[in-house]
Image (cartoon, rainbow, N blue to C red):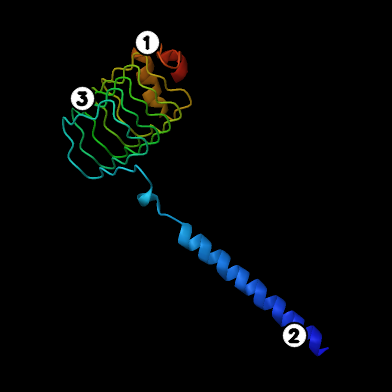
Amino acid sequence: MQAAIVKAVKTLFWLALALVLAIGWVVLSARPASAQDKTVNYSNTHLENRDFSHLDLAGAVFVAAEMRGADFRGANLKNAILTKGVLLGADLEGADLAGALVDQVTLYKANLTNAILREAMLSRSSFEGVTVTGADFTDAILDRYDIAQLCKRADGVNPVTGVATRDSLGC
């Protein structure tokens, strides 16, 4: 009987040691999202008329950033976060915003010519006067009102994806 108790205690000891080592490995190897490689954070900054053309800004964060007249032509903004930003008159021609979060953004008179917005979250944003010739909105999330307004001026085919703007909006 005493041998069975000793064996049970040894088994519990080794299980507890394995559990402590596993937890230690997970805790020591984890990295917070803010420490990820190449993450750029422009939150709450003034970036008026800034030139970001053709830069790799995948995953960059632009929360509540003031970006009036900024140049994002040909920029890689895949999975970027632009929530609550101001992009009045910004140039996003040919920019790749696939999977981006563009929630509550003012895009008044912005240029989205040939932009890729596949699977982007574009809810509660303002698209008044936006140029969307050749833009690809495939599987993007937009408010119904915005879709109706964008369909009024949607035309062209995206040169990269080959998708017609009207088709990507479901016009």
**Which of the pair 161/170 is nearer the observer?**
161
Mark 1 or 2 closer to N-term? 2
Extreme residue toward the top, this view: 156
Question: How dense is the environment of label 2, judged by Cα within 10 Å: few (below 14), some, or many (20 and up)?
Answer: few
Question: How dense is the environment of label 1, judged by Cα within 10 Å: few (below 14), some, or many (20 and up)?
Answer: some
Task: Tell me the SS state at disc 3.
Answer: loop
Mark 3 or 1 closer to N-term? 3
Question: How dense is the environment of label 3, judged by Cα within 10 Å: few (below 14), some, or many (20 and up)?
Answer: many
Q: Is residue 151 above or below residue 44?
A: above
Please state the total of marks drawn on the protein image: 3
Extreme residue toward the bottom, this view: 2
Task: Tell me the SS state at disc 2.
Answer: helix
Instruction: Return the residue at label 3.
Output: 89
Residue 6 horizontal/vertical position (percent): 75, 85
Q: Residue at x 57, y 70 (%)?
A: 20
Q: Which mark is residue 155?
A: 1
Q: Quadrant of residue 122?
A: top left
Q: Which mark is residue 6?
A: 2
Q: How far separated are the C-alphas under marks 1 and 2? A: 78 Å
Residue 102 horizontal/vertical position (percent): 35, 34
